Image (spheres, grey):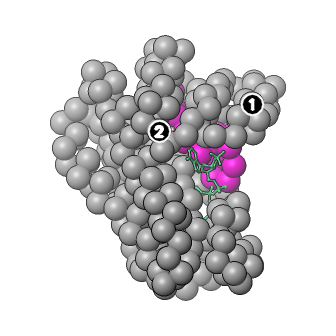
C-alpha cells in the first residue's frame, strides 16, 4: 500500500521560513519531491542543501507571488524538472496588522497582493497542468482569522476569508477533474509572521502573544501530510487547528 506522499511533486510558496520551510523539510523526509518558492533566494538555497544532504529531493526557484509571471515560472519549471505537479501548497502570506484608521494603505495592498492574488496566481499556474493530468491537489492556507474578524485585522482577515471562498469555489468546479482542494486554517504558530507589523506597540504585543502559546511550524507539516496522504477518492476539505489554550 502506498502512503500517497512518496514520489509526489510538491510546490511550496513561502518556503523560505516558518510553515513553508517546515513543510518542505518534513515532506521531503517522507519522500516528496519539493519545489521551494519565495523571494529570499539565500534561504531557499540553504534549505535545498539541507534537504539534499539528508537524502531528499528539492529545488529552489526564486518567486515573488505578487508577480504572475514568477508564479507561472515556478510551476512551469517544476513540470520541466519533475514531469508533473501533484500538489500546490499556496502558503505565502503576510500579516502586517494595524487599525484601519492608521491608513497603512500600502500594507493593505501588500496583503491583498500576497495573500489573495498570490493564491489565485498559484491556482492559475497549476490548474491547466492538473486538468491535463486528471489529478492534483491545491492546498490553500487561510487562518483562524479566516473564520473570525478582529480589530487591527480587518484587511488580513478579509484576505483569509477570501482564501476560504476561493477554495470552496474551486473545489466545486474542479472535482470532476479529480483535483482535490484543501484549506488549512492555522491558529497561533511561532514563525516570523509578526515581524512585518509596523504599527507602534502592536508588533511586540502580537509577537509576545504568539510566542507564548504558538505551536511549532512543523505542526503544519503534519496537517499537510494528513491531507495529502488520504486515498485519491477522498478530499480533506478543511483543517482548522490552534493551540489548545488559544481563545
Ligand atoms: P513566515 O513569515 O515565517 O513565512 C511567510 C512566507 O511567505 C515566507 O517564506 C515569505 O518568504 C513568504 N512570502 C511573503 N511575501 C511573499 C511574496 N511576495 N512572494 C513570495 N513569498 C512571499 O510566516 P508563517 O510561516 O507563519 O506563514 C505561512 C502562512 O500561514 C501565511 O499565509 C500566514 O498568513 C499563515 N498563517 C500563519 C499563522 C501564524 O500564527 N504563524 C496563523 C494563521 C495563518 P520571502 O519573504 O522570502 O518571500
Q: Position of residue 131 (x, y in %)?
A: 26, 27
Q: Report the side of 107 relative to 230 (left or right).
A: right
Asked whether 6 or 47 is in front, the reply is 47
Q: Residue at x 55, y 40 (%)?
A: 64
Res 155 visible: yes
N-terminal label among 1 and 2: 1
Q: Is residue 93 above or below residue 133?
A: below
Check disc 1 and report its element: helix, strand or loop: helix
The residue at the point 59 percent across, 55 percent down is 220
Residue under the point 57% across and 35% down: 63
**Magenta highlight range:** 8-26
Up-down: is 235 above or below 99?
A: above
Image quarter of residue 58: top right
The residue identified by callout 1 is 45
Position of residue 141 in the picture relative to residue 170 (left or right): right
Disc 1 vs disc 2: Cβ atoms closer than 8 Å? no
Is residue 12 one of those drawn in magenta? Answer: yes
Toward the viewer: 161 or 215? 161
Quarter of the rendering containing residue 159: bottom left
Which mark identifies residue 67? 2
Label placed on residue 85? none
Q: Eyeballing the image, is 198 above or below 93?
A: below
The picture places residue 65, in percent across and down from the top left corner, at 50, 42
Badge 2 element: loop
Query: Is any atom of residue 231 visible in this view?
Result: no
Amino acid at each position: 500500500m502506498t502512503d500517497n506522499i512518496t514520489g509526489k511533486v510538491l510546490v511550496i510558496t513561502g518556503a523560505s521560513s516558518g510553515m513553508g520551510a517546515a513543510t518542505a523539510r518534513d515532506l521531503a523526509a517522507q519522500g516528496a519531491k519539493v519545489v521551494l518558492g519565495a523571494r529570499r533566494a539565500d534561504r531557499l538555497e540553504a534549505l535545498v542543501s539541507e534537504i539534499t544532504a539528508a537524502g531528499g529531493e528539492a529545488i529552489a526557484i526564486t518567486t515573488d507571488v505578487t508577480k504572475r509571471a514568477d508564479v507561472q515560472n515556478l510551476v512551469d519549471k517544476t513540470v520541466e524538472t519533475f514531469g508533473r505537479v501533484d500538489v500546490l501548497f499556496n502558503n505565502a502570506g503576510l500579516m502586517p496588522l494595524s487599525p484601519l484608521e492608521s491608513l497603512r494603505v500600502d500594507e493593505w495592498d501588500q496583503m491583498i497582493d500576497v495573500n489573495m492574488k498570490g493564491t489565485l496566481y498559484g491556482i492559475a499556474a497549476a490548474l491547466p497542468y492538473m486538468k491535463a493530468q486528471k489529478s492534483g491537489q491545491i492546498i490553500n492556507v487561510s487562518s483562524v482569522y479566516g473564520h473570525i474578524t478582529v480589530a487591527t485585522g480587518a484587511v488580513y482577515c478579509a484576505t483569509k476569508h477570501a482564501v476560504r471562498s476561493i477554495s470552496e469555489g474551486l473545489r466545486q468546479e474542479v472535482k470532476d477533474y479529480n483535483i482535490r482542494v484543501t484549506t488549512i486554517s492555522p491558529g497561533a504558530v511561532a514563525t516570523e509572521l509578526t515581524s512585518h507589523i509596523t504599527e507602534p506597540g502592536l508588533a511586540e504585543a502580537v509577537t509576545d502573544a504568539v510566542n507564548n502559546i504558538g505551536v511549532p511550524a512543523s505542526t503544519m507539516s503534519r496537517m499537510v501530510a494528513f491531507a495529502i496522504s488520504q486515498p485519491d477518492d477522498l478530499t480533506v476539505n478543511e483543517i482548522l487547528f490552534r493551540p489548545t489554550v488559544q481563545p
